[in-house]
Amino acid sequence: MRLHDVSKSASNSEVPILSEEQLKKLQKLLLSILEDIDYICDKYNLKYILIGGSAIGAMRHKGFIPWDDDIDIAITRKDYNELVKIIRTEYSNKYSIFDANDDKNYGRIIPKIRLKGTTYRTILEPDLEDCGIRIDIFLIENVFNNFLLRNIQGIGCLFFGFALSCRRLYSHKNEFKNIVSGVSFKIKKFLGFIFSFASLETWARWTNKWYSICKKDDSKYVSVPTDGAHFFGELTNRTNLCDRKEIIFEGKKRYVPSSVDSYLTRIYGNYMKIPPIEKQLRSKYLEYNLGKYE
């Protein structure tokens, strides 16, 4: 499970949870960001898909999961590199974007497009200067066709992803102690100390470089190593993720994998079943300010 998901059940009762009104306003702004992404991708022939909870929301609710506070999209590494260039040249007044290759990446490996002039700081981001409302971008990585190389790539992805997680936990051990605890927390904190011979930013760059080690844009296989099932759990034929179909999300046409049902079933099981109330968790936040968008 990703820390993002674990954070929703953090035990610190002093941290507020989004109200219904706050959540609706936040979702409205997320949709406006997605509209701009739609426009950019249509204009420059870039292709994205909704994944994770956003894909579940599209299939089950025709929009947001009612208690969800983010949008998750996936895009190939090649198209992502173009998207970054476009946003930073044509939309720099409106958006910032985190990238693992940045000098100051805060140890983040999942790129985020953030709306300037807003603040939405969760308990996982106490250190960030720029905490605008964001859309998470999960990179679809090329995977080697060769069995041996594919497994070496996968094992490396697991190592670097785990090492980065340990290093990040160690850097923010005081904040994360309210999110995770027990033996696993102590072990990861200790390993994070061992891995602290390199900075958090350096580990993020190393991890990002390894994830993108395969340069064959026509490889048979792809994976999304930053997602919850990690490299091997997300490993699939390219057509399963890169072939798309249209779907309605909040009243407008979006895209999901053409094999969206098998994809979601493989990752989540019976995704059409609405979880019980006690599992419909909202994120806890430290700061919330929509600025001029209020």
Image: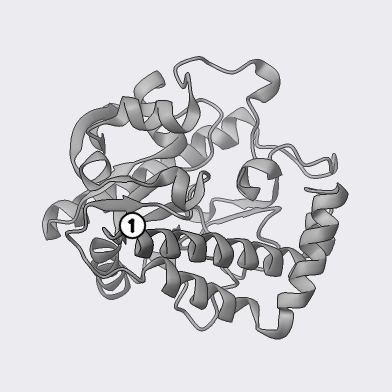
* Above or below: residue 136 compared with residue 104: above
Asked where in the image residue 241 lies, by quadrant, the reply is top left
The residue lying toward the viewer, choosing from 163 and 46, is: 163
Q: Position of residue 216 (x, y in %)?
A: 22, 66
| In-front residue for pair 246/78 | 78
Write down the residue under mark 1.
Answer: 147
Q: Residue furthest front?
A: 148
Residue at image position (42%, 45%) is 234
Q: Is residue 45 left or right of residue 154?
A: left
Instruction: Name the quadrant containing residue 80.
Output: bottom left
- Residue type at tag 1: Phe
Residue 154 visible, this orientation: yes
User: x and y percent of residue 103 in the render?
Assistant: 51, 84
Left or right, 12 with respect to 221, comes to right
Q: Visible in this render: residue 250?
A: no
Image colouring: one colour
Neighbour class for label 1 at 10 Å: few (<14), some, many (≥20)? few
Q: Is residue 249 above or below residue 78?
A: above
Q: Where is the N terminus found, in terms of image quarters?
A: top right
User: Of residues 31 and 189, which is closer to you in this image?
Assistant: 189
* Residue lying at 38% horizontally and 47% vertically, measured from the top left: 235
Residue at 28%, 60% in the rendered image: 146
Rendering coords of residue 81 (x, y %): 28, 69
Horizontally, residue 162 falls left or right of residue 38, namely: right
Give percent across and percent down for residue 87.
30, 67
Residue at 84 percent of width and 62 percent of height: 174
Q: Secondary structure at mark 1?
A: helix
